[in-house]
Image (cartoon, grey):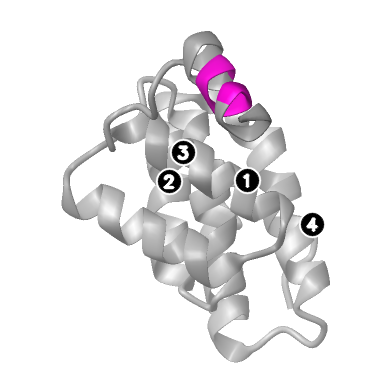
Amino acid sequence: LGELTSQFDLLRIYGTEPASQWLYYYQKAELRRQLAQWDQIAALGDEARSKRYAPDDSSEWFPFIEGYAMVHRYQDAAVLTRGVLKERPDALVPLSLLWSRVRARTGAPSIALNMTLHSLSNDLALGTVN
């Protein structure tokens, strides 16, 4: 009975789970980013994009950019990066830091990552790109 009461209390406080729209995908992706579940983030991004969901605040693409990059889907990540920068030029520093993290986490960067970083070097403050 205690567990049932707790579930009822949570539903009363938080309400039912929202319909699967943008916020649903963003919140799931952000949680998975904290857990480094990159494949799941990419899958969520694919599903949200296939349904043509998009955020009101383009910075909400960040977990998807990082997720795509961490599963070596650099072109998808780069397209989103450019889209965010177009809408939010003030995202330059956070996006540069995100891509620097990606570069650091991958160890020896692949040719594909280096090509992507080079293509983004005019848009981002990435320092030296190999």
The first of marks 4 and 3 along the sequence is 3
Residue where numbered disc 3 is placed: 26
The first of marks 2 and 1 along the sequence is 1
Q: Nearer the viewer, residue 89 or 69?
A: 69
Q: CA distance from mark 4 to mark 2?
A: 18 Å
The amino acid at mark 3 is Tyr
Of marks 4 and 2, the one in the foreground = 2
Magenta extent: 5-9
Q: Is residue 109 above or below residue 76?
A: below
Of marks 2 and 3, the one in the foreground = 3
Q: Is residue 104 above or below residue 6?
A: below
The first of marks 2 and 3 along the sequence is 3
The first of marks 3 and 1 along the sequence is 3
The amino acid at mark 2 is Arg
Residue where numbered disc 1 is placed: 31
Q: CA distance from mark 2 to mark 1?
A: 24 Å
Q: Position of residue 15 (x, y in %)?
A: 43, 16
In the picture provided, is 49 more to the left or to the right than 96? left
Q: Nearer the viewer, residue 11 or 51?
A: 11
Q: CA distance from mark 4 to mark 3?
A: 29 Å
Q: Position of residue 87 (x, y in %)?
A: 40, 26
Of marks 2 and 1, the one in the foreground = 1
Q: Residue at 79%, 87% (x, y): give it.
A: 108
Q: Is residue 5 above or below residue 79?
A: above
The first of marks 1 and 4 along the sequence is 1
Residue where numbered disc 4 is placed: 127
Q: CA distance from mark 2 to mark 3?
A: 19 Å
Callout 3: SS: helix
Disc ID at residue 119: none
Callout 1: SS: helix
Residue where numbered disc 2 is placed: 82
